[in-house]
Amino acid sequence: MTDPDPEPEGEAEQTTEFDPEKFEEKYVHYFDELEEAYSNAYQQLHGQVDSEVLRAIDRQVLSESEPVYEGNGEFSVSLPENPRERVGAVDDDEFEAVLSAFTERIERELQRLFGFETAE
C-alpha cells in the first residue's frame, strides 16, 4: 500500500542506504529515489505557487537538471544552461522564486530519502 500524501509528517521515516560511489551512476542505482524526491518537491509546492510557472520549470528546466552529491550529506541541483530562457513568458521574479524553492525542496527531499537528517 502506498500513501498518496508525499509529505513524511507523522509517518515512519523510510530511507535508502546511500553509497556515494553508487551515486556516480545515480540513474542505475537510485532512479526511484530521484524520481520520488522531484515528485515530492513538486507536490509540496503545488497549490502554493503559480501552477503554470511550476509546471514550466518542472518540464523545461528540472527535467534537464542533474542532482549532485556534494558530500557530508549535502545535495545540490545542477541546472541546464539558460534556465530562464527555457520557460518562456513568465515573470522574472516569480520564476526565480519558484525555481529556488523547487531546487531547495529537491535537495531536502534527497537528504530525507537517503537518511541525512537536516536541522531546520
Image: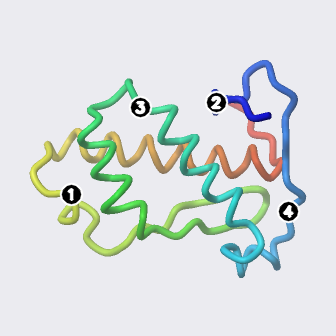
Q: Earlier in the sequence, mark 3 or mark 2?
A: 2
Relative height, residue 66 to residue 96 (above, below) = below
Q: Quadrant of residue 70?
A: bottom right
Q: Quadrant of residue 86?
A: bottom left
Give how far across and how far down residue 103 sits, in percent: 48, 50
Give how far across and how far down residue 64 sits, in percent: 41, 70
Residues at circles 1 and 3 in contact by the CB criterion of under 8 Å: no
Q: CA distance from mark 1 to mark 3?
A: 17 Å
The quadrant of the picture occupied by the C terminus is top right
Q: Residue at x 68, y 66 (%)?
A: 31
Residues at circles 4 and 3 in contact by the CB criterion of under 8 Å: no
Callout 2 environment at 10 Å: few (<14), some (14 to 19), or many (20+)?
few
* Residue on which disc 3 sits: 46
Q: CA distance from mark 4 to mark 1?
A: 33 Å
Disc number placed over residue 4 in the picture, else none: 2
* Residue on which disc 4 sits: 18
Find the residue positioned furthest to the left.
89
Q: Earlier in the sequence, mark 4 or mark 1?
A: 4
Q: Which callout, 4 or 3, points to the residue nearer the camera?
A: 3
Find the residue positioned furthest to the front.
1
Relative height, residue 33 to residue 100 (above, below) = below
The secondary element bearing badge 2 is classed as loop
The amino acid on which the numbered mark 3 sits, given as a three-letter code, is His
Q: CA distance from mark 2 to mark 1?
A: 29 Å
Q: Residue at x 64, y 50 (%)?
A: 36
* Residue on which disc 1 sits: 87
Q: CA distance from mark 2 to mark 4?
A: 24 Å
Q: Which callout, 3 or 2, points to the residue nearer the camera?
A: 2
The amino acid on which the numbered mark 2 sits, given as a three-letter code, is Pro
Q: Which callout, 2 or 1, points to the residue nearer the camera?
A: 2
Relative height, residue 75 to residue 28 (above, below) = above
